[in-house]
Amino acid sequence: MINEKFARFGTSHQTSWDGRAAANFILGGAGSALLAITVLASWPNTPNWPLLALALSLIGAGLASVWTEIGRPWRAFNVLFHPQTSWMTREAFVAGLIALLVVATIVTGMNLAAGAAALAGLLFLYCQGRILRAAKGIPAWREFSIVRLIISTGLVEGLALLMLADLATGTAYANMPAALLVLVVLRFGAWWIYRSRMLASDAPRSTRATLGLVHRALLGGTVLPALAVALAIAVPAIAAPGTAVAALTALAAGWWFKYLLITRAAQVQGYALGNKLRRGHPLANRA
C-alpha cells in the first residue's frame, strides 16, 4: 500500500456535510425509488395515491434536511442558478418536476403522468449518485463506481418500502420477495466492486475501518433478506413476517451505508507531492 504521507487521501474529514446531508441521500433516494417502483408494480393501472404522496414526502423531507444544514437557509435558492454545471441544481429541478407530475397523477389519474413521474424518480436517484461523483476533492465519493452503488441501493430501499406498505395494507405481491432478493444481490455486487477499488487505492486506516463496517452491514443486508425470503417461501404460514424481516433488514443496511458514507468515509484530499522527492539539486539524482 502507498504510504499515507504521499497518498491521494487526506487525513481530515470533510466538515461541510453531516447527518442532515446524509438524510437527503437516505430519504430522497428511498422516496425516488419508491415512486418509480410503485408505478412499475401498478402499471398499467394508476398507483394508489397514498404511496405517491409518501414517496414525494420522503423526497421533500430529504431536501428539507439539507436546507436546515445551511448557515443562512435563504442562500439555498442559489442552487437554482447553476443547472449547466451543478448536479445539485439538477436534483432540485427534478424534485420540482416530480412534485408536479405526482400531483398531476393524483388529480387526473392518468397513467401517462405516473409513468413520467417514475422516470423523473429514477433521474433524481441518478442525480444523487452524480452529486457524490462530482465531489472531486473527496476520493471516497469521486470513485466512478459510486453512481451505480447509489442507484442500486436506492432501488433496494424503494422496493423494501413498497413491500412494507403493501404488508401493512394487506395487498402484498407474490413476486416482490424474489425481486428484492435480486436487487440486494445486485447491490452487494456494486458494493464489492466499489470496495475492491477503494481497498486497492491508498485509503487511510480510518476509511478502511469504515469500509469494514459498511461491508458487514451490506453483507448482513444481503444474507438476512435471502434467508428470510427462503423461509417465507418454504413456510407459507410465516410468509408475511418473513417478508417483513427481509424488507426491514435490506432497508436498514442501505440507510446505514449511506450514513457512514457521508459522515465517516469522506476524507478530504490533501496535497499530493509524490514519493520521488530527493534532497539536493533537482538535477542531482537524474537517472
Image: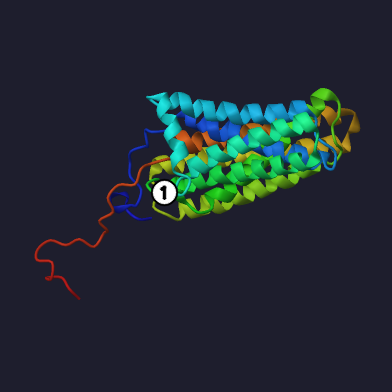
Identity of the residue drawn at 33% across and 41% down: 11
Mark 1: few, some, or many residues within 10 Å (few <14, many ≥20)?
Answer: many
- From this view, report whether residue 144 is shown above or below residue 113: below
User: Is residue 233 shown left or right of residue 283?
Assistant: right
Q: Percent x, y for residue 124?
A: 60, 42
- From this view, report whether residue 10 is shown above or below residue 61: below
Circle 1 is placed at which residue position? 139
The answer to which of 282 and 52 lies nearer the viewer is 52
Can residue 236 be seen in this snapshot?
yes
Q: Percent x, y for residue 236?
A: 90, 33
Can residue 247 be seen in this snapshot?
no
Q: How many marks?
A: 1
The answer to which of 106 and 272 lies nearer the viewer is 106
Colour scheme employed for the rendering of this structure: rainbow
The answer to which of 118 and 24 lies nearer the viewer is 118
Q: Percent x, y for residue 163?
A: 77, 32
- From this view, report whether residue 189 is shown above or below residue 159: below
User: Is residue 34 shown left or right of residue 265?
Assistant: right
User: Is residue 155 shown left or right of residue 209?
Assistant: right
Residue lying farthest to the bottom in this orientation: 287
User: Is residue 82 shown left or right of residue 174?
Assistant: left
Q: Quadrant of residue 249?
A: top right
Q: Quadrant of residue 153?
A: top right
| Quadrant in which the C terminus appears | bottom left
Identity of the residue drawn at 49% across and 40% down: 88
Q: Quadrant of residue 101?
A: top right
| Quadrant in which the N terminus appears | bottom left
Tag 1 secondary structure: helix
Q: Percent x, y for residue 34?
A: 70, 36
**Please, what is the three-letter code of the amino acid marked with disc 1?**
Pro
